[in-house]
Amino acid sequence: MSPSQILEEVRRKIDAATAHLQDELKKLRTGRAHPSMLDSVMVEAYGQTMPLRSVAGITAPEPQLLQISPFDPSNLQPIAEAIRNDQSLGLTPTDDGRVVRINLPPMTAENRQAMVKVLNQKVEDCFVAVRQARHDAFHKAEQAEKAKEIGKDELERFKKQADELVAQQKTQVEQLSKSKEQEILTV
C-alpha cells in the first residue's frame, strides 16, 4: 500500500469520526428546542420503519417547544409512540389529534453540567478513534518500509502528513466542542 493510499484511508477514518461526533452533538440537549434533536427517531409507518422526517414536518415554534405535524394523520399515534420509546431522548410527547407537541423542561445547572460531561466524553471518544486511525496508519507505513516498498524518507514524510491531518482535525473538534459547550451553558 502506498503512503498516499494510507493517508487517504486515515483521512476517511478521521472524517468519519468527526461526522459521527457531529451527529452525536446534535442529540445533546442544550435547553433549546431544535428539530435535529429528533433525527434519530424511527417510526413504524406503512408496514416499515421510517425516519421521522419522512413522515412528518418538525418545527420549533418556541424555544422550549417542538411541534411535529404528520403528513398523514393516521401516523400521529405511531410518531408519539416512537418518540416516547426512544430512551436516549427522554422526551414526553403530547398530541391533540392533529399535531404532536414536545415541551422541553428548562435545564437546571446540574443538568447543564451533566450535559457538558457527556459532551466531553463524546469528544474524547472521537479523539480516541482518530488516534487509533493514526496508529493503524503508522503501523501500515512501517510495515511497507520494512518490506522495502517505501524508503525511510518517504516514511518520515508520511508520518509528518498524518500528524498534520490529526492536528487539523483536533482543532476542528475542539472548536465544535467549545461552541456546543457554550450553547449548553447559555441560559
Image (spheres, rainbow, N blue to C red):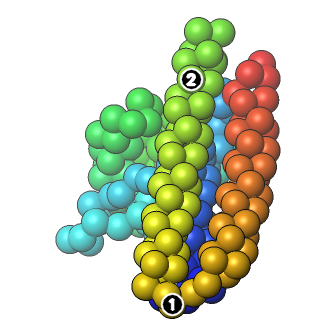
Going by the numbered disc 1, the residue's amino acid type is Glu
Q: CA distance from mark 2 to mark 1?
A: 45 Å
**For discs 2 and 1, the disc positioned in front in the rendered view:** 1
**Residue 117 numbered mark, or none:** 2
84 in relation to 151, above or below: above
What residue sits 32% from the left and 47% below the top?
Answer: 82
Residue 99 visible at all: yes
Element at label 2: helix
Figure quadrant of the C terminus: top right
Answer above or below: position of 144 versus 161: below
What type is the residue that disc 2 sits on? Answer: Lys
Vertical relation: 156 (above or below) 57: below
Residue drawn at x 20%, y 71% as measured from the top left? 47
Which of the 4 image quarters holds residue 164?
A: bottom right
Q: Position of residue 170 (x, y in %)?
A: 71, 50
CB atoms of marks 2 and 1 within 8 Å: no
Image position, residue 29 (x, y; %): 59, 32
Q: Give me the residue at 30% from left, 52% from top.
A: 78
Q: How many marks?
A: 2
